[in-house]
Amino acid sequence: MGVVAKRSSMTFFSDPQCHYCHRVRIVLAEKGVTVDIETVDPANPPEELAEVSPYNSVPTLVDRDLALYESKVMMEYLDERFPHPPLLPAYPVARALNRQFMYRIERDWCQMVDLITSKGSTKEADAARKQLRDELVSIAPIFAENPYFMNEEFSLVDCCLAPILWRLNWLGISLPNTKQVKPLHAYMQRIFERPSVMQSLSEIEREMRP
């Protein structure tokens, strides 16, 4: 993957089914950064990953002498290093709100995705599926207010949310096709049609949705 638009010497260590890796790949594609993507099996990481990450984990982004191993740090670094198109608002209050949205997505929904992925078909995972579905249904009407998540422009918040929504079928979650949820379905279609989101997908991720 990589749109040859901006010169870069980056390497991105990525698990092809990890939603944290996916969010960074969306940012890389949105910015048009040329990057070498090293596909990593988390159960058998390559030696070079241990050399740059103290946790020997993915995602890890290496840009010359800089190594980053936290996804939100990577996303903001890429947004500052490649400022066009901007993926965070210009004003401090709006930027802070976007960071807080990202925090809540990670603390609430990402943890449920991680639990479902790790626990499979257990009662604990089923409870997380129901909770995630119910929470998405409850907030669905807010997607009628703006084209993107609480914003007129595509942002890092959408980059965090898109991988979760892309994985819903794979996670065993089906959203109802009701009037209340219609704005969320429209939002999902809108972001899934973005070239950056399509370009970011691994082969495994492409098979996650019908």
Image (cartoon, helix red, strand yellow):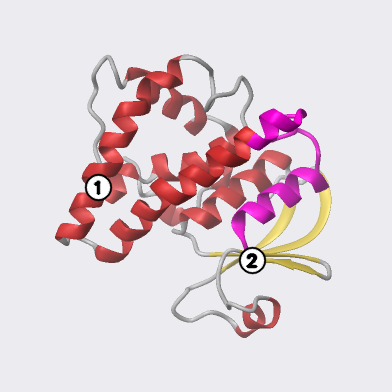
Residue at the image point whose x is 30% and y is 42% from the top: 132
Q: What residue type is labelled 2?
A: Tyr
In this view, the residue in front, 160 or 47, is 160
Q: What element carries label 1?
A: helix
Left or right position of 195 against 62: left
Residue drawn 51% across the image and 48% down it: 201
Residue 191's x, y, as percent? 51, 30
On the rendered image, what quadrant is the C terminus found in? Answer: top left
Splitting the image into 4 quarters, where does residue 87 fall?
A: top right
Q: Is residue 12 left or right of residue 125?
A: right
Residue indicated by mark 1: 129
As helix, strand or loop, the secondary structure at mark 2 comes to: loop
Determine which residue is flagged by label 2: 69
Tell me where residue 47 appears, x and y as whole percent: 62, 85
User: Which residues make up the magenta segment?
Assistant: 69-96
Query: Horizontal and vertical percent for residue 59?
Result: 58, 63
Chain-order first, disc 2 or disc 1: 2
The three-letter code of the residue at mark 1 reads Arg
Residue drawn at (22%, 27%), measured in percent from left and top? 176
